[in-house]
Image (tube, rainbow, N blue to C red):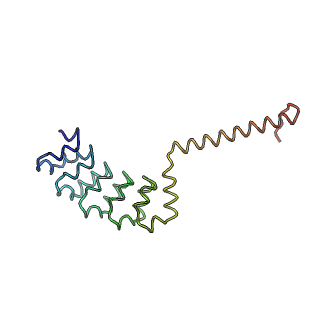
Amino acid sequence: AAVRQNGWALEYAAAPLKADREIVMAAARQSCAALRFAAEALRGDREFMLAAVQHKGHALGYAAGPLRADREIVLAAVRQSGSALGCARAELRADFEIVRTAVREAGRVALQQAGYELQADQYLQRLATEAGRPMRLRAVLKYARDLREANLKAKVDLWLTCRNDGELHHW
Protein backbone atom coordinates (compact mmCIF):
# COMPACT_ATOMS: atom_id res chain seq x y z
CA ALA A 1 0.00 0.00 0.00
CA ALA A 2 2.88 2.37 0.76
CA VAL A 3 4.26 1.94 -2.77
CA ARG A 4 1.03 3.39 -4.18
CA GLN A 5 1.87 6.62 -2.33
CA ASN A 6 5.61 6.54 -2.99
CA GLY A 7 7.25 4.06 -5.37
CA TRP A 8 10.57 4.42 -3.59
CA ALA A 9 9.08 2.64 -0.57
CA LEU A 10 9.81 -0.59 -2.47
CA GLU A 11 13.43 -0.22 -1.37
CA TYR A 12 12.44 -1.05 2.21
CA ALA A 13 9.99 -3.85 1.36
CA ALA A 14 10.68 -7.47 2.25
CA ALA A 15 12.12 -9.71 -0.48
CA PRO A 16 8.82 -11.54 -1.19
CA LEU A 17 7.13 -8.17 -1.78
CA LYS A 18 9.87 -7.13 -4.19
CA ALA A 19 8.97 -10.19 -6.25
CA ASP A 20 5.21 -9.53 -6.21
CA ARG A 21 4.06 -8.37 -9.65
CA GLU A 22 1.20 -6.16 -8.43
CA ILE A 23 3.21 -4.42 -5.73
CA VAL A 24 6.19 -3.76 -7.98
CA MET A 25 3.95 -2.52 -10.81
CA ALA A 26 2.23 -0.13 -8.39
CA ALA A 27 5.65 1.18 -7.35
CA ALA A 28 6.75 1.49 -10.99
CA ARG A 29 3.64 3.52 -11.81
CA GLN A 30 4.72 6.01 -9.15
CA SER A 31 8.37 6.04 -10.24
CA CYS A 32 9.98 3.77 -12.78
CA ALA A 33 13.22 4.15 -10.83
CA ALA A 34 11.63 1.99 -8.12
CA LEU A 35 12.23 -0.95 -10.46
CA ARG A 36 15.87 -0.96 -9.36
CA PHE A 37 14.64 -2.50 -6.10
CA ALA A 38 12.50 -5.16 -7.80
CA ALA A 39 13.53 -8.80 -7.79
CA GLU A 40 15.80 -9.80 -10.69
CA ALA A 41 13.23 -12.35 -11.79
CA LEU A 42 10.67 -9.58 -12.39
CA ARG A 43 13.17 -7.35 -14.15
CA GLY A 44 13.84 -10.26 -16.49
CA ASP A 45 10.16 -11.15 -16.97
CA ARG A 46 9.22 -10.19 -20.54
CA GLU A 47 5.47 -9.70 -19.93
CA PHE A 48 6.01 -7.68 -16.78
CA MET A 49 8.60 -5.38 -18.34
CA LEU A 50 6.49 -4.92 -21.48
CA ALA A 51 3.64 -3.68 -19.28
CA ALA A 52 6.04 -1.45 -17.34
CA VAL A 53 7.54 0.24 -20.43
CA GLN A 54 4.09 0.78 -21.91
CA HIS A 55 3.30 2.84 -18.84
CA LYS A 56 6.68 4.55 -18.43
CA GLY A 57 9.16 4.17 -21.27
CA HIS A 58 12.18 4.79 -19.08
CA ALA A 59 11.43 1.57 -17.20
CA LEU A 60 13.49 0.04 -20.01
CA GLY A 61 16.58 1.25 -18.17
CA TYR A 62 15.81 -1.17 -15.32
CA ALA A 63 15.05 -4.20 -17.49
CA ALA A 64 17.41 -7.16 -17.52
CA GLY A 65 20.06 -7.02 -20.26
CA PRO A 66 18.43 -9.39 -22.77
CA LEU A 67 15.15 -7.44 -22.62
CA ARG A 68 16.94 -4.26 -23.65
CA ALA A 69 17.69 -6.07 -26.90
CA ASP A 70 14.07 -7.22 -27.35
CA ARG A 71 12.68 -5.29 -30.32
CA GLU A 72 9.05 -5.35 -29.17
CA ILE A 73 9.88 -4.08 -25.69
CA VAL A 74 12.16 -1.31 -26.98
CA LEU A 75 9.56 -0.23 -29.54
CA ALA A 76 6.90 -0.04 -26.82
CA ALA A 77 9.25 1.98 -24.63
CA VAL A 78 10.10 4.56 -27.30
CA ARG A 79 6.44 4.92 -28.25
CA GLN A 80 5.78 6.00 -24.68
CA SER A 81 8.97 8.05 -24.27
CA GLY A 82 11.31 8.59 -27.20
CA SER A 83 14.25 9.41 -24.99
CA ALA A 84 14.13 5.84 -23.64
CA LEU A 85 16.06 4.95 -26.80
CA GLY A 86 19.24 5.56 -24.83
CA CYS A 87 18.44 2.53 -22.66
CA ALA A 88 18.25 0.15 -25.64
CA ARG A 89 21.10 -2.02 -26.85
CA ALA A 90 23.28 -0.56 -29.60
CA GLU A 91 21.90 -2.82 -32.34
CA LEU A 92 18.39 -1.49 -31.72
CA ARG A 93 19.58 2.12 -31.62
CA ALA A 94 20.64 1.46 -35.22
CA ASP A 95 17.18 0.12 -36.21
CA PHE A 96 15.50 2.68 -38.49
CA GLU A 97 11.91 1.95 -37.40
CA ILE A 98 12.73 2.17 -33.70
CA VAL A 99 14.73 5.38 -34.13
CA ARG A 100 12.01 6.94 -36.31
CA THR A 101 9.41 6.17 -33.63
CA ALA A 102 11.64 7.62 -30.91
CA VAL A 103 12.39 10.76 -32.94
CA ARG A 104 8.70 11.37 -33.58
CA GLU A 105 8.14 11.24 -29.84
CA ALA A 106 11.20 13.10 -28.51
CA GLY A 107 12.82 14.94 -31.42
CA ARG A 108 16.53 15.73 -31.29
CA VAL A 109 16.97 14.16 -27.86
CA ALA A 110 16.16 10.76 -29.35
CA LEU A 111 18.19 11.34 -32.51
CA GLN A 112 21.29 12.04 -30.42
CA GLN A 113 20.93 8.58 -28.86
CA ALA A 114 20.63 6.79 -32.22
CA GLY A 115 23.43 5.00 -34.04
CA TYR A 116 25.88 7.25 -35.90
CA GLU A 117 24.63 6.28 -39.35
CA LEU A 118 21.06 7.19 -38.43
CA GLN A 119 22.11 10.46 -36.81
CA ALA A 120 23.34 11.55 -40.25
CA ASP A 121 20.10 10.55 -42.01
CA GLN A 122 18.51 13.67 -43.51
CA TYR A 123 14.95 12.39 -43.15
CA LEU A 124 15.45 11.71 -39.43
CA GLN A 125 17.12 15.10 -38.94
CA ARG A 126 14.16 16.85 -40.57
CA LEU A 127 11.74 14.76 -38.52
CA ALA A 128 13.62 15.65 -35.32
CA THR A 129 13.39 19.34 -36.16
CA GLU A 130 9.64 19.08 -36.81
CA ALA A 131 9.05 17.06 -33.63
CA GLY A 132 10.89 19.72 -31.65
CA ARG A 133 8.33 22.36 -32.58
CA PRO A 134 5.35 22.21 -30.29
CA MET A 135 1.89 22.60 -31.78
CA ARG A 136 1.42 25.88 -29.93
CA LEU A 137 4.47 27.35 -31.63
CA ARG A 138 3.13 26.29 -35.02
CA ALA A 139 -0.19 27.98 -34.23
CA VAL A 140 1.56 31.17 -33.11
CA LEU A 141 3.67 31.25 -36.27
CA LYS A 142 0.55 30.80 -38.43
CA TYR A 143 -1.21 33.58 -36.50
CA ALA A 144 1.77 35.91 -36.97
CA ARG A 145 1.90 35.15 -40.68
CA ASP A 146 -1.86 35.77 -41.04
CA LEU A 147 -1.57 38.99 -39.03
CA ARG A 148 1.37 40.17 -41.12
CA GLU A 149 -0.61 39.50 -44.30
CA ALA A 150 -3.65 41.36 -42.92
CA ASN A 151 -1.46 44.34 -41.95
CA LEU A 152 0.15 44.37 -45.37
CA LYS A 153 -3.26 44.30 -47.06
CA ALA A 154 -4.44 47.21 -44.88
CA LYS A 155 -1.32 49.22 -45.78
CA VAL A 156 -1.82 48.56 -49.48
CA ASP A 157 -5.50 49.57 -49.20
CA LEU A 158 -4.48 52.80 -47.44
CA TRP A 159 -1.89 53.58 -50.09
CA LEU A 160 -4.37 52.87 -52.90
CA THR A 161 -6.98 55.08 -51.22
CA CYS A 162 -4.52 57.97 -50.95
CA ARG A 163 -3.36 57.54 -54.56
CA ASN A 164 -6.89 57.49 -56.00
CA ASP A 165 -8.35 60.61 -54.40
CA GLY A 166 -10.01 58.74 -51.54
CA GLU A 167 -11.51 55.98 -53.64
CA LEU A 168 -10.41 52.40 -53.04
CA HIS A 169 -9.94 50.47 -56.27
CA HIS A 170 -8.66 46.91 -56.52
CA TRP A 171 -7.32 45.86 -59.85
Query: Residue visible at 24% across and 58% down?
Result: 46
The extreme right residue here reads 165
Left or right: 83 in relation to 125: left
Residue 148, quarter of the rendered image = top right
- In percent of width and height, residue 99 lies at 41, 61
Residue 27, quarter of the rendered image = top left
**In the rendered view, would you say 147 is above or below 75?**
above
- In percent of width and height, residue 158 lies at 79, 34
**In the rendered view, would you say 126 is above or below 149?**
below
The extreme top residue here reads 166
Left or right: 104 in relation to 20: right
- In percent of width and height, residue 145 lies at 64, 43
Query: Residue visible at 25% across and 64% down?
Result: 66
**Which of the image's four quarters has the N terminus?**
top left
- In percent of width and height, residue 18 lies at 15, 49
Foreground of the two, 17 or 9: 9
* Label tally: 0
**Which of the image's four quarters has the C terminus?**
top right
Left or right: 88 in relation to 112: left
**In the rendered view, would you say 119 is above or below 146?**
below
Query: Residue visible at 60% across and 43% down?
Result: 142
Query: Residue visible at 38% across and 64% down?
Result: 93
Left or right: 161 in relation to 5: right
